[in-house]
Amino acid sequence: MSNPQSLTQLFALDSLLEPEEIAIRDTVRKFATDRIRPHVAQWFEDAKLPARDLAKELGGLGVLGMHLDGYGCSGMSATAYGLACLELEAVDSGIRSLVSVQGSLAMFSIHHWGSEEQKQEWLPRMAAGEAIGCFGLTEPDFGSNPAGMRTNAKRDGDDWILSGTKMWITNGSIADVAVVWAQTDLDEGPKGIRGFVVPTDTPGFSAPEIHAKMSLRASVTSELVLDGVRLPSSAMLPLAKGLRGPLTALGEARFGIAFGAVGAARDCLETAIDYAQSRIVFDKPLASFQLTQAKIADMALEVGKGHLLAYNLGRIKDRGEITPEQISTGKLNSVREAIAIARECRTILGANGITLEYPVIRHANNLESVLTYEGTSEMHQLSIGKALTGEAAFR
């Protein structure tokens, strides 16, 4: 038997990265392997995550808001951030979600749309993992159509009173601050949507955790309830007007998913290859059968192409030229292929593939959520379709 190649060697992936990017990737990979991988299956089974401890460690690693400048943030490139997401999701989507929501949704919104006072108050602590943030956009009846949100903010003198409910909010129950989007009377329709920085100890705010999940179990998912939450006028994000505010932040998170889901696919494939090499069937390794090699070859093509697409999107984003449709292309392709690869790898592992002894079924379950959040596959198909035809088919 000849010496097998790795996926990295097959596609010469490291030749496309700068030395600093490889160093960042390897640092995050080592942290994920040493600190998270030994425990994540148990966290998944118990549906419990030591999120506060992990946030501080991730903050010390420099990955929280790592693509933002100043205020204690690392100021790394978009590509470096994507590589970090890839390595974190190679261990578990829930861990990457913690980092994405913290950095690309909550911190990005404050950094991009907030006042100097809001930035100084929250960003350094969030970058260090000492304060955890969440992002309240999705509602029970409004996911793909956030313009229809019912959460509202009404003026009362110099204050704002927020009322409403948000759903499927990562980090919600453990957050110190929530970026909440609400309808106001400042403009008609979606133009009246504004963002608010809400300390979670404000009276009227609660965040009951959602239980009985079969996906993203190593992640905190919550409902946000705003029952007459009174905020000063300074709580509004002054530069965010209309849906552009939350949608820009979602684009940041989707970019991370375009990398992250590739990491989950890679981990499944590497697990399946290792298993097939050691599993003896009919007196020889499972890896020596043609059908097994055909599966591995086909999956390797998709994982490799997923890396290449993600790397290219990183370069485009670092040039400041990326478009929402390009991000949709990355998110749609990476997650759709990753979930198909996870299911195919499960067939190579046979019955062993349904246990938490191996990561494959955990990745498959997690990817069911990743397929839906930050824009469903259908919405990304329509975004790409509009870009190519010039016709909007959302309604």
Image (tube, grey):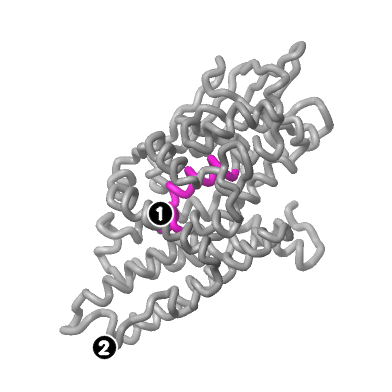
Is 144 in front, or is 71? 71
Q: Earlier in the sequence, mark 1 or mark 2?
A: 2
Residue 35 shows in this picture: yes
Q: Quadrant of residue 188?
A: top right
Q: Residues within 10 Å of mark 2 (few under 14, many from 20)?
A: few
Residue at (49% x, 78% y) in the render: 11
Q: Quadrant of residue 157?
A: top right
Q: Amino acid at mark 1?
A: Asn
Decide: is 257 above or below 278. above
Residue 172: assigned label: none
Residue 45: x and y, percent? 30, 45
Magenta region: 87-104
Residue at (25% x, 63% y) in the render: 352
Residue at (68% x, 34% y) in the render: 149
Residue 295: x and y, percent? 39, 78
Query: In the visual, does 204 lie left or right of 159?
Result: left
- The answer to whether the residue labelled 1 contacts the one labelled 2, judged by CB atoms less than 8 Å apart, is no
| Residue topped by disc 2 | 1
Residue 365: assigned label: 1
Prevailing SS of the magenta stretch: helix
Query: In the visual, does 282 lie left or right of 33?
Result: left
- Count of all numbered marks drawn on residues in the image: 2
Q: Residues within 10 Å of mark 1 (few under 14, many from 20)?
A: some
Distance (Cα) linking label 1 and label 2: 35 Å
Decide: is 172 above or below 291. above
Q: Is residue 101 magenta?
A: yes
